[in-house]
């Protein structure tokens, strides 16, 4: 069984060290429990869903004797790569770091539990040629089933904290595609009228991730789109994205795509039999 996907009914196993690279999705089926996350205590009851990236940050787990839960955890980067960078997932991850508990209706809980069971039942099929694609499609279904109640919750959230406002403004800036040419934290700090340190500390505290990671998450899809356009030379793409040199552009591709721009282009070509 792949360690990228794990399923369990053990509430006290949700913050195990081996899950530190995953995103945890835990559904309370009965009873009640509590835990501490980001220095805040949360209480859950039946039909409450908990979504926490890197769940080893959870502390002080406590459950009543009648507690029943099921959870599914998947590699965090694997899940992130399934979604477009400008998807609700980015804004959603911010609010989940602020409050990881989403209350579901009976119908929403039943749908999500069915998602868990489909994933559980296919986890051991790693011998299949398209195993990761199969699991990816099932994970994507689960995430979209979570987005609906999550978006409903956030629509009624009146939280106006200054730090949350700064992070949301950053995400709005990035959603315009400005990272095509602006990839420095200092640029965004200036646009938001705060210091680079304040912006970095705030984003890290609210989301658990760095400003740079969000900049790159928005930039990589732009980069891939350009590389997929055969009408553009590598030099033209480097100029469009305002890289100082072709070598700088190549290093960025190697770091964020895992291969050189020319190799990435080659990988897009149909495989010959």
Image (spheres, rainbow, N blue to C red):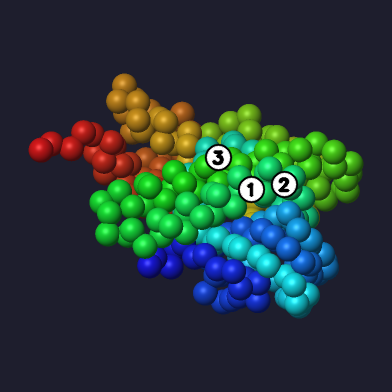
Quadrant location of the C terminus?
A: top left
For label 2, count other residues whose C-alpha is less than 10 Å away and answer few (under 14), some (14-19) or many (20+): few
| Disc number for residue 19 | none
Calculate the distance from the C-alpha at mark 1 to the C-alpha at mark 2.
6 Å
Measure how far apart labels 2 and 3 are at the Cα level: 31 Å
Q: Residue at x 85, y 42 (%)?
A: 157
Residue 219 x %, y %: 52, 39
Residue farthest along the top direction in this orientation: 231
Q: Is residue 18 above or below residue 83?
A: below
Contact? badges 1 and 2 (CB < 8 Å): yes
Instruction: Name the residue located 47 percent from the left edge and 59 percent from the top edge.
Output: 120
Report the quarter where the N terminus lies.
bottom left
| Camera-nearest residue between 87 and 16 | 16
Q: Which residue is mark 1?
A: 110
Please name the residue shown 47% across and 37% down the image: 221
The residue under label 3 is 85
Residue under the point 82% across and 64% down: 43
Element at label 2: helix
Q: Work out whether residue 269 or residue 93 is closer to the camera in this orientation and state it.
A: 93
First in residue order: circle 2 vs circle 3? 3
Residue 187 percent coordinates (x, y): 67, 42
Say few, some or many: other residues with alpha carbon within 10 Å of mark 3 (under 14 / 14 to 19 / 20 or more).
many
Q: Is residue 109 something that shows in the picture?
A: yes
Which-is-in-front pick, marks 3 and 1?
A: 1
- Lateral position of residue 2 relative to residue 92, left or right: left
Tell which tag, 2 or 3, sits nearer the viewer: 2
Q: CA distance from mark 3 to mark 1?
A: 29 Å
Q: Is residue 113 left or right of residue 127?
A: right
Query: What residue sits right under mark 2 in the picture?
Result: 106
Q: Position of residue 259 (x, y in %)?
A: 32, 50
């Amino acid at each position: 069984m792949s360690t990228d996907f794990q399923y369990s009914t053990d509430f006290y196993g949700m913050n195990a060290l081996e899950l530190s690279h995953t995103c945890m999705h835990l559904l309370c089926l009965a009873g009640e429990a509590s835990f501490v996350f980001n220095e805040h205590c949360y209480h859950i009851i039946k039909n409450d869903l908990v979504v926490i990236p890197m769940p080893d940050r959870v502390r002080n787990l406590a459950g009543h004797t009648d507690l029943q839960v099921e959870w599914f955890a998947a590699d965090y980067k694997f899940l992130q790569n399934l979604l477009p960078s400008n998807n609700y997932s980015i804004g959603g991850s911010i609010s989940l770091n602020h409050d990881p508990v989403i209350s579901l209706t009976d119908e929403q809980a039943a749908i999500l539990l069915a998602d868990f069971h489909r994933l559980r039942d296919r986890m051991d099929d790693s011998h299949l040629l398209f195993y990761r694609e199969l699991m990816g499609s099932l994970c994507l279904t689960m995430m979209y089933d979570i987005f609906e109640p999550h978006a409903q919750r956030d629509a009624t959230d009146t939280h106006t904290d200054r730090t949350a406002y700064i992070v949301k403004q950053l995400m709005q800036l990035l959603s315009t595609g400005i990272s095509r040419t602006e990839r420095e934290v200092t640029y965004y700090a200036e646009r938001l009228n705060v210091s680079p340190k304040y912006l970095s500390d705030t984003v890290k505290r609210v989301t658990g991730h760095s400003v740079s990671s969000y900049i790159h998450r928005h930039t990589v899809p732009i980069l891939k789109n350009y590389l997929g356009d055969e009408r553009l030379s590598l030099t033209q793409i480097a100029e469009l994205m305002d890289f100082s040199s072709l070598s700088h552009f190549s290093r960025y591709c190697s770091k964020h795509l895992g291969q050189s721009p020319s190799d990435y282009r080659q990988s897009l070509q149909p495989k010959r039999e």
